[in-house]
Amino acid sequence: MTTKPSSPELAWLLAGLVQRVPHTRSALLLSSDGLPRAAHGLADDGADHLAAIASGLFSLTRSAGEMFDAGGGVRQVVAELDATLLFVTAAGDGAVLAVLADRQADVSVLGYEMSQMVKSVRPYLATPVRGVVPSAVAP
């Protein structure tokens, strides 16, 4: 297992979250459009794949909120797989936190720890919107 290239502070925060909650396997911070920023407990391929999944889930849920919840924001998405729980939550402007845990994990403790981490470092987790790169004009 490796850590995606990122600031050491982000990797340290994710590692702390995984270590604090029993049966938690990995954590990933990504931009809302699916680019991994930091990961703990995931190889690069796994981080890229989870980023795409988490971004898609977050986007679909945000769309459901706009349609059926009077534009309400997304608090958390939880997917229960056969042996794994996947949590996806907003982590700041343009940032999303995804966590994988075994089914034995205490969901209330994990949800609480995720929200506490996000609250305490939300400004640092924000991902600025990427600007459009101007195309080169041929002379």
Image (spheres, rainbow, N blue to C red):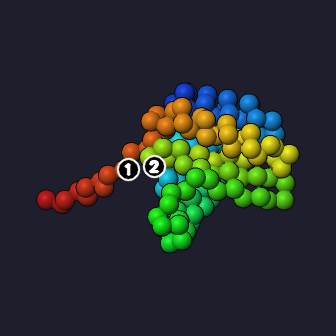
**Image quarter (top left, top right, bottom left or bottom right) of the C terminus:** bottom left
Residue annotated with mark 1: 129
Describe the element under mark 1 as helix, strand or loop: loop
Of pointers 1 and 2, the one earlier in the residue sequence: 2
Residue farthest toward the front in the current orientation of the protein: 70
Within the image, what quadrant is residue 22 found in?
Answer: top right
User: What residue is drawn where x is 54% and y is 36%?
Assistant: 119
Q: In this view, does 130 lie above or below 58?
A: above
Q: Which amino acid does label 2 sit on?
A: Gly
Q: Position of residue 121 (x, y in %)?
A: 51, 33
Horizontal side of 22 relative to 34 (left or right) equals right
Q: Where is residue 87 in the image (x, y as percent from the top left)?
A: 68, 51
User: What residue is drawn where x is 59% and y is 34%?
Assistant: 117
Is residue 67 visible to the viewer in this orientation of the structure?
yes
Q: Where is residue 123 in the image (x, y as percent from the top left)?
A: 44, 36
Are the two marked residues, 1 and 2, in contact with CB atoms closer than 8 angstroms?
yes
- Count residues near mark 2 (Cα–Cα under 10 Å), then give few for <14, some for 14-19, many for 20+: some
Residue annotated with mark 2: 94
